Amino acid sequence: MIISGKELANKLKSQMAEFVATLPEKYGRVPHLVVILVGDDPASQTYVKNKGLAAERIGMKSSTIRLAASTTEEELLALIASLNEDDTVDGILVQLPVPKHISEQKVLDAIDKSKDVDGFHPMNMAELWRHKYALVSDNDSYDEMSAFTLPCTPKGCIKMLKAAGVELQGKHAVVLGRSNIVGLPMSKLLLNENATVTICHSGTRNLAAITRSADIIIAAIGKPKFLTSDMVSPGAVVIDVGINRDEEGKLCGDVDFASVEPLCSVISPVPGGVGPMTITCLMENTIEAFLRRMAH
Ligand code: NDP
């Protein structure tokens, strides 16, 4: 079965739109997301545009602040500080990567943790590791939302797995990649769902033997078509997080979809898989940030 992240994302966005439409009556306004883009990286421009479109589609307010690549770290930090203070702003996202003369870490640390809708603030990351059972909610009522922000991509992957009816409890999940934004939080969310998790990285030996022992593989390494059929056992579930270009410049994931798909019980495609779910979870995180702020 091929899980369409795009279809699931559309369904969730429709549900969110209905929910957002009820908010003005109760709170006098809708959630407001501010996205900051520094420089003119084409991929980042596309991501930022898509985030704005998704917010519009669900009826949220979204603002995009485009800054020149020459913007100083000081200027960016001052902008973030003013948005932190602005009561009409619920979510702040700085599109990564930032230009080399700006410290990514300082930028992520500067965003108020209650407005950190990416879930990259050190306090949100710490909360994820501290809470043994910070589960990804699979309902849309927001009455079971997490007390802090879960990072969008791993959250989207868990939602896809749940929507496809994949049982996680007791399963061997192998995560390829250990980045702070995907691999590591992915591993923790799978642990919270009681999977048994192996994390692999560039220093892992006998990778193929490990992936062959997996019930579930999450590929997040950024290498085009890296996971091949000889690395996957029949019946495995494969989620492909990678966004790469192949030799012909075509968008592809970390999984060699053509050879791996016939083996899998469930697999996510690229494009149309994790990508749309990441954006959808960003929207959900913004709604959640809004609701937490309104509750205070
Ligand atoms: P990073 O480059 O930060 O991390 C890559 C990880 O993969 C590292 O932990 C690295 O190991 C590991 N790795 C690299 N080569 C190998 C190898 N040969 N064998 C095993 N492990 C390896 O990438 P990100 O985590 O940010 O992103 C991963 C991919 O996911 C990219 O393609 C990115 O574009 C995509 N992405 C997609 C999103 C979406 O919404 N669909 C969102 C975010 C990312 P080590 O730590 O040892 O260096």
Image (spheres, grey):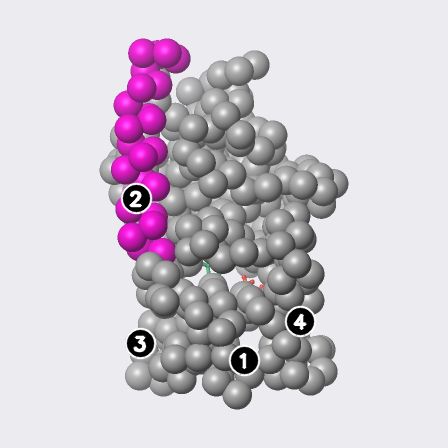
Q: Quadrant of residue 231?
A: bottom right
Dot in front, 3 or 1: 1
Q: Along the line of sight, which residue is nearer the eye, 161 or 94?
A: 161
Q: Secondary structure at mark 1?
A: loop
- What residue is pinned by disc 1? 233
Q: Report the Cα–Cα distance between label 4 and label 1.
A: 17 Å
Mark 2 CB within 8 Å of ligand 1: no
Q: Amino acid at mark 3?
A: Lys
Instruction: Identify whether 6 is placed above or below 246.
Output: above
Residue 70, x across and y down, in percent: 46, 51
Dot in front, 3 or 2: 2
The answer to whether residue 17 of the structure is visible from this angle is yes
- The image's mark for residue 198 is none
Per the rendered image, the range of residues in magenta is 5-28
- What residue is pinned by disc 4? 200
In primary-sequence order, the first of circles 3 and 4 is: 4
Q: Amino acid at mark 1?
A: Ser
In primary-sequence order, the first of circles 4 and 1 is: 4
Q: Report the Cα–Cα distance between label 2 and label 1.
A: 31 Å
Q: Amino acid at mark 4?
A: Cys
- CB under 8 Å between discs 3 and 4: no
- The image's mark for residue 250 is 3
In primary-sequence order, the first of circles 3 and 2 is: 2
